[in-house]
């Protein structure tokens, strides 16, 4: 029935103030109000309809994306939306587009690596969308190994220009979003060559297409790289291929904040670390962590609401069957994902703070926290995107057969999300960066240099190598200090074990290669510790609202004890806890699931997602799943006619043939 809230009994069970939790989730009252207003604006505008997306072919899908992007831009101007509001609007449209790369990478690359003059020239054009940009780093033959890029930018002192060239097939730019069909400009990464000398990879602003007729400029071959995983999903994006044949650009289009080339062709390195050329990646990795909490919370919201609607088995004397959310196995799969969504939200908030802090320091020429920022953004990007991709797929399974329907919203969400494990740095490659940072920190422990930031715990080396957990009963695992010490000891001992093993090899590089699987595990342990510790820190803040803090304490314990249970091998083999303590953790976890159960629906309501944004029949706010699934099925283009196209051509002759054979 329309208008009936089938989940109302669940909502009435909530033991906390959902409106206050919405504010905690959004980050502040103001952020909540902006997000809520913009989400409703998008949901109520038929121009942003998306329910037909999975049935469109690539060309229609892409054209539709362009239409939505242009309409969104018109609304942004008409409504005079500020930067934050415009960002929210684009994200609620929920359709990856060239604008993501324009605003998300092209603009930040110029801001981070351009000189003041370059920013003054290019940013106003980009802000008004008089030019559209992409970020073209990856090549056909080189993605992770940025130092291995082959595109060249050779300075020609005669003309005061750089000549951009793709010397080989493998040097073609390959993957940049927005490049395929739309970008007029790109920040192109290429090896800088002056006077025959290779200075490594630098960024250059290059115009790719004419601003009059959109045709590629001379010397440029550009196109789309083809269909990607999933039907609609990421195929709204024109990922591109680009080949340069001696394309000339003025010298002042090299991004010159980190290093410069003078009129005479002299290479000058500023007094800043060369790694700042990688700054855009640090920025984007930081945003990807917050986006992980958004993607995971969407999937969890769908799976939780549907699990409360869906019933299987357990009917006695005609009573309703059991809601699948009441099965302990369903809770043990679903509630850790719910807790992870909250955990990633808070660690994302903290990472944003860390990024802003490092940016301020860089402006003041303090580069001391750059390695920490790189390790944290790389590690947390890897940890949260892997967990989110796996989590979305788990949510699909939690919804049984109906989860496999596109109308559940889950297949598309998975297909669009899963490349996050690869883009902006392959997750294993990034964990190896964290491992390097950890090995460096461990090796410096004896030198008197105290570890700082998220590795500060390593400063308590002696204690962490010796401590034994004092957990005696299940509820001891609810004490934050007990949990924190176990995670610190596990992470530290795994790092120390790797560091010791590295010394057994003839060179550190050989050891690093040989032990890389163990190093990745040590890096994961360290990153999980960061997430747990930031959740615990969040709970030390003043959090208003009836029962809100209590629910978050439960979720924090679920997150930590779920990880402890999943990785108990690490905790046991490093001797941080005993087998008895491990089973007490599991006992406590079961009890926590029972505490989450009555609040589960309200905890996902706190994400404040509109039905438009969720795009899921299973995750509808009102829980009216079955009639809507039935309605949705009839909308499929296959049901436009009773007898399908092709029947008369292929099936009928076959049937007739069978009849003849049967008569024989
Ligand atoms: C339902 C429908 C819709 C729903 C939508 C919702 C879902 C969301 C969808 C989202 C939609 C759109 C978003 C799309 C966004 C896509 C963007 C993707 C863009 C890209 O992928 S751009 C390309 C990114 N490429 C990479 O990340 C490459 C990875 N490789 C590297 O970063 C590096 O090369 C390296 C592996 C880190 C370094 O390798 P190497 O050891 O060779 O390093 P160097 O010798 O160069 O330097 C070593 C030295 O430098 C330190 N260091 C390395 N990186 C950094 C850094 N970034 N910052 C600071 N320092 C760095 C390193 O630690 C070493 O230091 P040391 O010498 O040890 O002190
Ligand atoms: C949807 C999407 C959008 C993208 N958008 C852009 C964009 O806008 N701009 C842009 O420039 N790029 C973009 N990319 C490219 C992306 O950044 C790269 O694909 C990514 O950095 C991974 O690099 P790769 O493809 O070279 O993987 P590879 O490095 O070839 O990885 C292949 C395998 O090798 C392993 N491996 C690699 N090196 C090591 C090592 N040292 N040790 C152990 N294992 C290793 C990896 O773990 C992986 O399993 C995009 C990619 C995708 C999928």
Image (tube, rainbow, N blue to C red):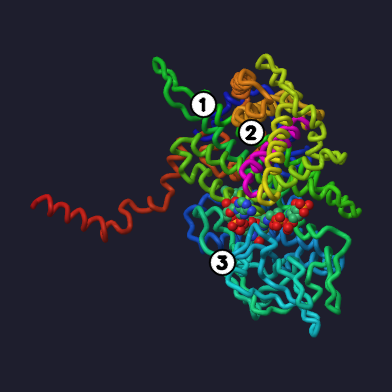
Residue 586 image point, x, y percent? 60, 22
The answer to whether 54 appears left or right of 32 in the picture is left
Residue 46's place in the image compared with 602, above or below, is: below
Judged by depth in the image, the label closer to the viewer, 1 or 2, is 1
Left or right: residue 367 compared with residue 471: right
Q: In the rendering, at what x and y percent does residue 604 appear?
A: 63, 33
User: How many numbered discs, if any?
Assistant: 3
> In which quarter of the view is residue 388 placed?
top right
Q: Are marks 1 and 2 in contact (CB under 8 Å)?
A: no
Q: Dot 1, crowdedness within 10 Å: few (<14), some or many (≥20)?
A: few
Q: Residue at 44% x, 42% y: name it.
A: 631
Q: Position of residue 17 (x, y in %)?
A: 71, 26
The stretch drawn in magenta includes residue 187: no
Which picture quadrant has residue 244? bottom right
Give yes or no for contact between labels 3 and 2 (Cβ–Cβ under 8 Å): no
The label nearer to you, 3 versus 2, is 3
Predominant SS of the magenta segment: helix
Q: Mark 3 sits on what residue? A: 224
Residue 577 lies, in percent from the top left, at 67, 23
Residue highlighted by disc 2:
605
Estimate the spatial distance between the alpha carbons at disc 1 and disc 2, rounded to whole Å: 22 Å
| Sequence order check, earlier mark of 1 and 2 | 1
Q: Secondary structure at mark 2?
A: helix
Most foreground residue, 658 or 557: 557
Q: Element under label 1?
A: helix
Label 1 belongs to which residue?
Answer: 329
| Residue furthest to the left | 664
Magenta part of the chain: 512-537
Residue beneath the point at 48% across and 60% down: 57
Ranked by sequence position, the earlier of labels 1 and 3 is 3
């Amino acid at each position: 029935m329309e208008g009936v809230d089938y989940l109302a009994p669940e909502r009435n069970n909530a033991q906390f103030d959902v409106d206050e939790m919405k504010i905690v989730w959004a980050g502040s009252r103001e952020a909540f109000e902006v997000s809520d207003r913009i989400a409703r604006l998008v949901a109520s505008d038929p121009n942003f309809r998306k329910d037909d997306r999975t049935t469109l072919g690539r060309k229609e899908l892409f054209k539709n994306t362009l239409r939505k992007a242009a309409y969104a831009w018109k609304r942004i101007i008409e409504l005079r939306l500020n930067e934050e509001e415009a960002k929210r609007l684009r994200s609620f449209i929920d359709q990856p587009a060239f604008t993501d790369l324009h605003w998300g990478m092209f603009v930040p690359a110029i801001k981070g690596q351009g000189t003041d003059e370059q920013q003054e020239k290019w940013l106003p054009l980009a802000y008004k969308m008089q030019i559209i940009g992409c970020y073209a780093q990856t090549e056909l033959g080189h993605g992770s190994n940025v130092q291995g890029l082959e595109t060249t930018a050779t300075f020609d002192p005669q003309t005061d220009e750089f000549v951009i060239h793709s010397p080989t097939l493998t040097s073609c730019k390959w993957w940049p979003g927005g490049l395929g069909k739309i970008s007029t400009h790109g920040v192109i990464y290429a090896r800088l060559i002056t006077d025959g000398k290779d200075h490594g990879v630098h960024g250059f602003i290059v115009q790719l297409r004419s601003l009059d007729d959109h045709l590629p400029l001379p010397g440029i071959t550009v196109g789309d790289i083809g269909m990607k995983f999933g039907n609609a999903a990421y195929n709204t994006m024109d990922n591109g291929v680009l080949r340069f044949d001696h394309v000339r650009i003025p010298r002042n289009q090299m991004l010159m904040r980190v290093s410069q080339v003078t009129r005479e062709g002299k290479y000058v390195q500023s007094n800043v670390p060369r790694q700042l050329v990688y700054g855009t990646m640090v920025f984007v990795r930081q945003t990807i962590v917050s986006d992980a909490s958004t993607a995971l919370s969407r999937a969890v919201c769908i799976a939780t609401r549907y699990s409360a609607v869906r019933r299987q088995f357990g009917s006695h004397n005609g009573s309703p069957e059991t809601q699948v959310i009441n099965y302990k196995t369903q809770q043990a799969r679903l509630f850790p994902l719910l807790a992870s969504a909250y955990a990633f939200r808070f660690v994302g908030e903290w990472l944003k703070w860390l990024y802003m802090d490092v940016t301020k320091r860089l402006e003041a020429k303090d580069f001391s926290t750059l390695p920490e920022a790189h390790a944290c953004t790389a590690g947390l990007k890897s940890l949260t995107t892997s967990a989110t991709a796996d989590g979305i797929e788990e949510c699909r399974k939690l919804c049984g057969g109906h989860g496999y329907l596109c109308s559940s919203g889950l297949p598309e969400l998975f297909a669009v999300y899963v490349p996050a494990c690869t883009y902006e740095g392959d997750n294993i490659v990034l964990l190896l960066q964290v491992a390097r940072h950890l090995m460096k920190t461990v090796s410096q422990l004896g030198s008197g240099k105290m570890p700082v930031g998220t590795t500060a715990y390593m400063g308590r080396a002696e204690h962490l190598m010796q401590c034994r957990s004092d957990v005696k009963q299940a509820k001891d695992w609810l004490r934050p200090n007990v949990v924190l010490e176990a995670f610190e000891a596990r992470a530290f001992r795994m790092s120390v074990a790797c560091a010791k093993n590295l010394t057994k090899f003839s060179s550190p590089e050989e050891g690093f290669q040989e032990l890389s699987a163990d190093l990745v595990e040590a890096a994961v342990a360290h990153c999980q510790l960061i997430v747990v510790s930031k959740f615990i820190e969040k709970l030390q803040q003043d959090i208003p609202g009836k029962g809100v803090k209590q629910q978050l304490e439960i979720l924090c314990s679920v997150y930590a004890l779920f990880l402890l249970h999943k990785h108990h091998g690490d905790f046991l083999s490093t001797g941080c806890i005993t087998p008895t303590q491990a089973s007490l953790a599991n006992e406590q976890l079961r009890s926590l699931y029972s505490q989450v159960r009555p609040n589960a629906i309200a905890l996902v309501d706190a994400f404040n997602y509109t039905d438009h944004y969720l795009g899921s029949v299973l995750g509808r706010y009102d829980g009216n799943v079955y009639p809507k699934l039935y309605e949705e099925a009839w909308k499929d283009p296959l049901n436009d006619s009773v007898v399908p196209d092709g029947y008369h051509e292929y099936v009928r002759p076959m049937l007739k043939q069978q009849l003849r054979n049967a008569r024989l």
